[in-house]
Image (spheres, helix red, strand yellow):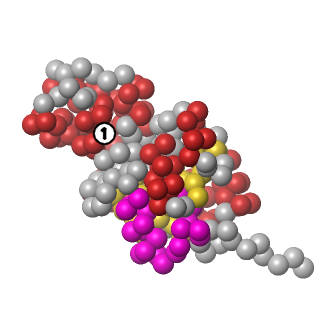
């Protein structure tokens, strides 16, 4: 009888939007609608999607760099308005729930590192009934935003896993740079906010082109 394969990673940390949740297009549209509300230049799809993964204020500052600093809170409020109005449209990528359940069955610790706010993440967790699957979560408004390593370092400290036993999974260069800055391995996914052309600079172990691809890789190599 073959002995069970030893895990390479004890802790697997997932980005949220564009990695587990099919939310990239909605975030882009809400950001553009908020800019239109304020009568400022509307960012292109490429510009708006590139900042996904950052904290909201930082994302808006990068997407709309010419706005007076005093108006970013107003822009953020309009973004949240549009997002709340349409968040019921959001769904997990097909196969995500089964993937997470399989990882839990193998006794991996699971965590989330996201640019969302704590309120936004908690609402999403309730919406898709994921309570109990994640052992720890960190959001951009309660720690340093990506790619600063603090978010990932705090998750590793909370679980008690070293960088060598931790894997970060994300759809943006912000996620992969976060992993590099924190000294962990990473896996990229190509179906989220960023095209994978720039991923190679951050040395991911794999780039998954679907949730099924990601699940298969994690099953074989995680």
Q: Which segment did they paint magenta?
A: 149-168
Q: Residue at x 57, y 54 (%)?
A: 186
**Where is 145 relative to 200, above or below?**
below
Name the residue nearer the viewer: 5 or 165: 165
Residue 32 in which image quadrant: top left
Residue at 30%, 34% in the rendered image: 62
Residue 154, horizontal then vertical, whole percent: 39, 68
Classified by dominant secondary structure, the portion drawn in magenta counts as helix
Residue 43 image position (x, y, % from top left): 32, 24
**Residue displayed at 55% across by 36% down:** 198
Q: Which residue is mark 1?
A: 59
* Residue 108 sits inside the magenta stretch: no
- The answer, for residue 84, to whether it is visible in the render is no
Compared across the picture, whether 160 is left or right of 42 comes to right
Furthest residue in direction left, as rendered: 70
Residue 176 image point, x, y percent: 51, 49
Q: Is residue 36 left or right of residue 45?
A: left
Number of callouts in the render? 1
Residue 152 or residue 38, whichever sits in front: 152
Residue 162 in the magenta stretch? The answer is yes
Relative to 55, is 45 on the left or the right?
right
> Badge 1: how crowded within 10 Å, few (<14), some, or many (20+)?
many
| Kind of element beneath mark 1 | helix
Q: Which residue lies at the image location 71% right of the left edge and 61% below the top edge?
A: 221
């Amino acid at each position: 009888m073959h002995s069970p394969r030893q895990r390479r990673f004890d802790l697997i940390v997932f980005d949220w939007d564009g990695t587990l949740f099919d939310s990239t297009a909605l975030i882009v549209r809400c950001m553009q609608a908020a800019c239109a509300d304020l009568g400022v230049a509307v960012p292109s799809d490429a510009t708006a999607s590139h900042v996904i993964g950052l904290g909201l204020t930082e994302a808006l500052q990068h997407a709309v760099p010419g706005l007076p600093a005093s108006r970013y809170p107003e822009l953020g409020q309009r973004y949240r308005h549009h997002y709340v109005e349409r968040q019921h449209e959001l769904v997990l990528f097909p196969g995500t729930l089964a993937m997470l359940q399989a990882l839990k069955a193998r006794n991996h610790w699971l965590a989330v590192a996201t640019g969302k706010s704590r309120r936004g993440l908690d609402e999403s967790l309730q919406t898709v009934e994921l309570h109990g699957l994640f052992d720890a979560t960190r959001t951009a408004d309660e720690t340093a935003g990506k790619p600063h390593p603090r978010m990932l370092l705090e998750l590793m400290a909370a679980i008690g896993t070293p960088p060598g036993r931790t894997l970060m999974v994300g759809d943006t260069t912000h996620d992969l740079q976060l992993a590099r800055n924190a000294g962990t391995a990473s896996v990229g996914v190509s179906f989220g906010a960023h095209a994978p052309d720039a991923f190679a600079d951050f040395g991911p172990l794999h780039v998954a082109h679907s949730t099924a691809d990601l699940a298969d890789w994690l099953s074989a190599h995680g």
